[in-house]
Amino acid sequence: MGAGDPLIVGVSTRALVESAVNAGWEIPSLDYFGDRDQKELVANYSLAKDFGLPLSGKGLFEAVKRLKPGSLYYVAGLDNHPQLVARLAREMTIFGNSPETLVKSKDWRFLRSICEKSKITCPKTLLPGEILNYPSGEWLTKPAYGGGGRAVRPWQGGPLQKGEVAQALVKGRPASCAVLADGSDSVVLGITEQLIGRQVFGVGMFRWCGNIHPLALPSDLNESLWEQVEEMAQILTRNLGLKGAFGLDLVITSHRQGIRAFLIEINPRPTASMELLEAQLGLNIFSLHQKASDGRLCPPEVTKPRGFVGKAVVFAGKDLVMPSTRAWKAKGRKDIPFGREKVKAQAPICTVFADAPTRDECFGELCNQAGRLRQEIADEIRY
């Protein structure tokens, strides 16, 4: 790429790159993996393979500085480092949320106050210095700046470390809400089921590993849920100044009085679930994100989805060396490693996709595809 070109950057950029290509943009990208299918689309740079840098905010920042783009679109990774985004913003145009908004989106003291004032439902959340030695019920602790369920663990009380929060465990259905906003107004694009801690895909208890769209609910509960998340998205947009495409992680509970959406966290950038909406609803997330980031909210015409579409990231059960992967694209797989590439245990191998008339059939096909993949590469997971 040349100095001054736009750049898409994050831990894994393939989905937004595909969206940009579909919109007629061939934008270079920088991510950690540098997978085969992404390099077939655009000039893609890998932190590890091309720069010898670690997967970290500082690693992404250093590589961006070397590439010298004129504008930047970020996905998961840089959103956890608002101070680095602020430094980059002095030298280039940033499409997405401002550093100030990134800080607010992870500040649970601020978010807790907004939720209390506006009646948004969220779990009881504690910050460092707010100690419950013997908390009632089940609690989890997690990094305030994190994602994907990494470093989430049960908490039995005691001091919290700097950068940690503790949340009461809400038992329900994990979901992800895709939102488009211009800093003042918002539009909910869709709600997906989150696949969390599914051993069949090789992850532990709280790790994210995929999504299914739409979230399967009876029609009366679905209408009530949409009303709740639309109001939630609007309140958060106006209080945080959220722009572009972003996600809300939710847990959905059902009770006699109806349905309730608990806000678990905000993902202030395009999320992994959005490519399912793009495929099923005919949206272009890149174009919508670009315009909304620039203050132009263009609500798309969203049709009612037919059937269900899903994706699952398959993680390695043991250390592997990849066989030839040339035929994987024809099998509908994405985020494809190169042949002879080493994949460590618990690292992602690739992403599989499915579509089916029902939610259960869609999930079943994702499981079948994961099984066929493991059989091909002689992988195994220990339950």
Image (cartoon, helix red, strand yellow):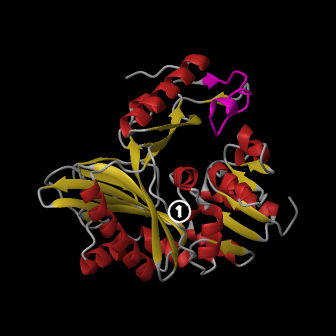
Tell me the quarter of the picture where residue 161 sits: bottom left
Residue 102 image offset from top left, x and y in percent: 51, 71
Q: Is residue 48 left or right of residue 147?
A: right
Instruction: In this rendered view, identify the residue nearer to me: 347 or 375.
Output: 375
Q: Residue at x 67, y 35 (%)?
A: 336
Residue at the far right in the pictured view:
2
**Residue range (magenta):** 320-338
SS of the residue under disc 1: helix
How far across and how far down the image is residue 228, in percent?
30, 68
- What amino acid is labelled 1 in the image? Asn
Measuring from the top left, give residue 266's x and y in whole percent: 43, 64
Query: In front: 6, or 17?
Result: 17
Q: Quick check: 226 above or below 311?
A: below
Residue depicted at 73% across the width and 25% down the height: 340
Q: What is the crowding at mark 1: few (fewer than 14 residues within 10 Å), some, or many (at least 20)?
A: many
The image quadrant that residue 325 belongs to is: top right
323 within the magenta span: yes
Give the labeled residue for mark 1.
80
Say whether residue 299 is magenta: no
Q: Which quadrant of the figure has residue 351?
A: top right
Image location (x, y in percent) of residue 220: 25, 58
Please determine whether, in this image, residue 182 is positioned above or below residue 156.
below
Q: How many marks?
A: 1
Residue toward you, 171 or 369:
369
Q: Split into 4 quadrants, where in the image is the C terminus? A: top left
- Is most of the magenta stretch helix, strand or loop? loop
Tell whether 262 sits left or right of 106.
left
- Tell me the residue at 64%/29% (across/down): 331
Can residue 162 be seen here? The reply is no
Q: Is residue 152 visible?
A: yes
